[in-house]
Image: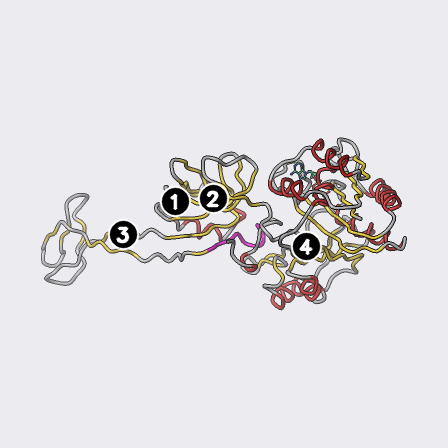
Amino acid sequence: MLIGIDDTDSPRGMCTTYLGAVLARNLIREHMRVREARLVRLNPNVTWKTRGNAAIMLEFEGDPERAFEITCNLVEELADQSCENTNPGVVVAEKKFDPAFYQKAVTNFCTVDEAVAILEAAGARYRGWKNRRGLIGATAAVASELADKTSEILVYREPERFGTPRHVSRESLFAAEAATFPHTWDTVDVVNDVVVCVPHTPDPVLFGIRGESPQWVMAARQMILSEHPGIEQIWVTNQGTDAHLLPGTTGHLQDLISYFVSGTVTSATETKVGGHVSFIMKDGDFAVRCMAYEPTKNFRHIVRQLVPGDRVIAVGSFKKGSINLEKLKIVSLEKVEKIRPPLCTACNKRMTSDGKGKGYKCKKCDARTEAPDVQVGNRTLAPGWYEVPSTARRHLAKPLCRGFPD
Ligand code: ATP
């Protein structure tokens, strides 16, 4: 038996994962067995999402009718329906749906009608509130089949503390990262000295630890000192798996879809107002702009070193004509020529330029020459994969500590 839920939160509070964690406890209280709690992130470019476009699935053993009733009652109780953009969806199914719907929901866009057609064909119990959009995520969560998966332990706050400042020991978070990286990631951003895993929004989450397995996230979690926590749930997730990426080619990219795209840099990089860095790359006849926005911090230092002729693979979402970089592979580097005044053959001193197009002159012996000293310079940049820092990473983006893309 599978329960899917989505779209219960608003910017003012709540979180579908919290509702799922409470639901798991309510089912257990009714003597049902919860076999898996799954958190799926869907297309990160969906504009009507509240935060991270999450949906949840609980796999359980028990009476589906009773589970449906308990779930709907909990959504009525906890979902922030006063928010225009909160449109909950609940699905209870006795078997999995075709994973193609999940694939589409994580990489592309789906409609409520498409979700309802699947639910009707499967004879599933379902309910959508208001415009019923949450049925898309709820159906995708039940349809999800994860080729690659990671874990996240979400530690929630005691309800009476919701909306108040969070207290989590910064030192303990850095210590947990130091002790468990690369088996856990994105607890803190060591390079930028920032805590990443504690949200600033008024939702019920106190902190979340992401990692390879329940054991690793638990190991890190046990090192963290904080205010007295409420309930805690380990989720199986598609986070950190690059599930949102499709192979793409320049000239054939669709807006709000995320891709791997190969090309050759054709422009010098430009830094725009606000610190956003861009360059143009081309594959065949088609060019595309690649952007490294200011929040990607030190990643921009890599991008700034690209020169025309470098071959790269750009990874990110295509939005309004640009690829917003999440990762970048430098496939090969163009050789750069360094042109300097030559050495004087008589004095072995560096000559000076006599003006544009006028050649070079030795200040010591007045010798003249036309030809500059041309050297093929070594690039400090090395081929390989580069990624945005933890502070700028999307939930679905696979961190390089998990391995490089194929
Ligand atoms: P929550 O914690 O409530 O899940 P969120 O940030 O994850 O918050 P939602 O409030 O759930 O975002 O909003 C996302 C909405 O978009 C949901 O109604 C979901 O069903 C819908 N949705 C998700 N993926 C797609 C998709 N690929 N195409 C169309 N709609 C989608």
The crowd level at tag 2 (other Cα within 10 Å; few <14, some 14-19, many 20+) is many
Which of the two discs, 3 and 2, sits closer to the camera?
Answer: 2
Q: Which residue is mark 1?
A: 264
Q: Look at the numbered discs 4 and 3 and tell me whether their residues touch, using CB distance below 8 Å.
A: no
Q: Amino acid at mark 3?
A: Glu
Q: Quadrant of residue 230?
A: bottom right
Q: Which residue is mark 2?
A: 261
**Viewer can see residue 54:** yes
Q: Amino acid at mark 4?
A: Val
Examine the rendered structure and indicate whether residue 154 appears above or below residue 293.
below
Q: Which residue is mark 3?
A: 337
Which of the two discs, 4 and 1, sits closer to the camera?
Answer: 1
Which residue is outermost to the bottom?
179
Label 4 vs label 1: CA separation? 39 Å
Q: Look at the numbered discs 4 and 1 and tell me whether their residues touch, using CB distance below 8 Å.
A: no
Which of the two discs, 4 and 3, sits closer to the camera?
Answer: 3
Label 2 vs label 4: CA separation? 33 Å
Q: Which residue is mark 4?
A: 198
- Give the secondary structure at mark 2: strand
- Give the secondary structure at mark 3: strand
User: Foreground: 125 or 319?
Assistant: 125
Q: Amino acid at mark 2?
A: Val
Tag 1 or tag 3, which sits nearer the N-term? 1
**Viewer can see residue 12:** no
